[in-house]
Image: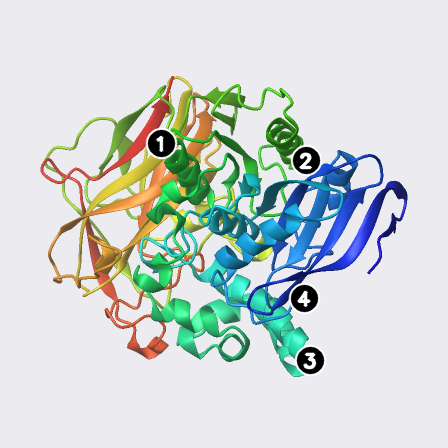
Amino acid sequence: MPAEPFPGIPEINLERDAPCRLRDGVTLYADVYRPAGDGPHPVLLMRTPYGKTGGESDVGYAHPSWYARHGYVVAVQDCRGRFASEGTFYPFLYEAADGYESVEWAARLSGGNGKVAMYGFSYVGATQLLAATLRPSSLVTICPGFTASQYYEGWTYNGGAFALAFAALWALGLAYETARRAGDDATLDEIGGAFAGLQGVYGAFPLREQTVLARHAPFYLDWLEHSAYDDYWRRWSIDEDYARIEVPALHVAGWWDVFLSGSIANFAGLSALGGAAQKLLVGPWYHCPWTPLDPTGPSGQVIDDWQLRWLDHFLKGRETGVLDAPATVWVEGEGWRDLDGWPPSSSRPVDWFLHSGGRANSAFGDGTLSPEPPGDEPADVFVYDPSFPAPSRGGHSCCFEDAPMGPAAQNATEALGTVLVYTSAPLERDLVLVGDASVTLHAASSARDTDFTARLCTVAPDGRSTNLQEGIIRARFRDSLTEPKPLRPGEAYEYRIELGPLGVRIAAGQRLRLDVSSSDFPQWDRNLNTGGALGTESASAAVTATQVVLHDRSRPSRVTLPVAS
């Protein structure tokens, strides 16, 4: 369609449905926003599965016209098989090749100067990273926000456990557009009902028999089928070989985002190569919308400001100070802090050990947490029944309020006897944590397979317990995400649970707390304790497991915290 002045912003022209014809005959369509003044201008390309007329700007970035007003030609393109674009959509499958061709197409747009940058968050971050692995010659820089380093660990699975809340919600959203394109009103109604009753979706067994997802999101069944890290996932993994990406990148993340660990891993992995400049920006946001979850913190609009500085530096040659520090993070309870990398050299790992007299069940038990190693102490025992999982309250899932994300009071969960709770004495001085945290757990189970979960919390003087980070390990994946191995019931194993990145100042007078259980539902699916194939078993197959957590001289269970100066 011919370009027309953008309503209310006469200095911007908008061309709708600009075609990009790919070598395989599929045509992708983009809306192109051009400054009406003198050019040529650098080009910003966004490739999205969420609709080029809304997509990212309705929950995150400034509208593309804002970037056009700052001297950029902005092309927002529907991915293959989505909205206006032709073809069939399958997550991740076409994004590297389609992205490569789309970058070179964008470099030839009228009004552009041949220099292209890409931007966008979540899946749109994946479209950038995958395109960059093929090294299109016109790509100058990328700005991947709130995205992962691979699409098994940290996207669809965590520690071998299926990220149920996120995966089901995302697949339903993708299925909705597929059904709309097919004119399937009955399925649209069915999906609408599923969105309204998500707890029913989360609670259904077997997982593979979600009829809506099976019909219009068949890739959901593939995700369940490939429950280990195999070649299905490896072909799309950014972190398999960071050396493929040679362009500078601005990595944007949120402390409460589902892809926090992956975003930081991308920054660290690319920085370690010592090649193109990399920058990390982390703020007090969850996936979307970018509400400041630290009441003193910045809104997501600061992301546009940083991104514009980055783009002006690399596409216009301006000195903006964007590279003054490798990383800039919002430390909750403190404010912005510049870092020399991730993890920062100013942080060191410090172990806090689990202790009890054998009755750490619930916050009313005798579990404690301290830097002192344990002596000869009795183990703690709890029962995990998959029919009554410990509920997720807040966390790092996605998306919007229907998923467990953000800080939340943990006291109701910590009242359950199926949760072990270990609490420190009040801190004598402020404690600053910046870096990655993890849990080393020595535990045994009566089952052939099970899960162990951990939540790191702070406890205010009034007793309110609030989550900071959480993690899970599916026991069969304790040694390898590629080659699962069943447990020998009753045998103790050492488990490592990755909690992920932290950036927080904990005030004196507060206490640290670690919650240990075998479920965090629906953030992760319920392990039925059978060792059976994921998604194939009904609720009646569930086995109740007796779990034993050991913390003694030879088996010191502990949480390792990144203490910063």
Q: Write down the residue under mark 1.
A: 272
In three-dimensional space, the C-alpha distance between marks 4 and 3, rounded to whole angstroms, equals 12 Å
In three-dimensional space, the C-alpha distance between marks 3 and 2, rounded to whole angstroms, equals 37 Å
Where is residue 463? Give x, y as percent: 45, 35
Q: Establish if 226 lies above or below 6.
A: below
The residue sitting at 84% across, 47% down in the picture is 13
Where is residue 79? Give x, y as percent: 60, 61
The residue sitting at 41% across, 47% down in the picture is 149
User: The residue under label 1 is which amino acid type?
Assistant: Ala
In three-dimensional space, the C-alpha distance between marks 1 and 2, rounded to whole angstroms, equals 29 Å
Callout 2: SS: helix
Callout 1: SS: loop
Where is residue 325? Give x, y as percent: 49, 21
Q: Establish if 261 lies above or below 81.
A: above
Q: Write down the residue under mark 3.
A: 183
Q: First in sequence, mark 2 or 4: give its number.
A: 4
User: The residue under label 4 is which amino acid type?
Assistant: Phe
The answer to whether mark 2 and mark 4 are in CB contact below 8 A is no
Q: Write down the residue under mark 4.
A: 83
User: The residue under label 2 is which amino acid type?
Assistant: Gln
User: The residue under label 3 is which amino acid type?
Assistant: Gly
The residue sitting at 73% across, 42% down in the picture is 73
The answer to whether mark 1 and mark 4 are in CB contact below 8 A is no
Where is residue 515? Give x, y as percent: 34, 44
Badge 4: few (under 14), some or many (20 or more) residues near its Cα, within 10 Å?
Answer: many
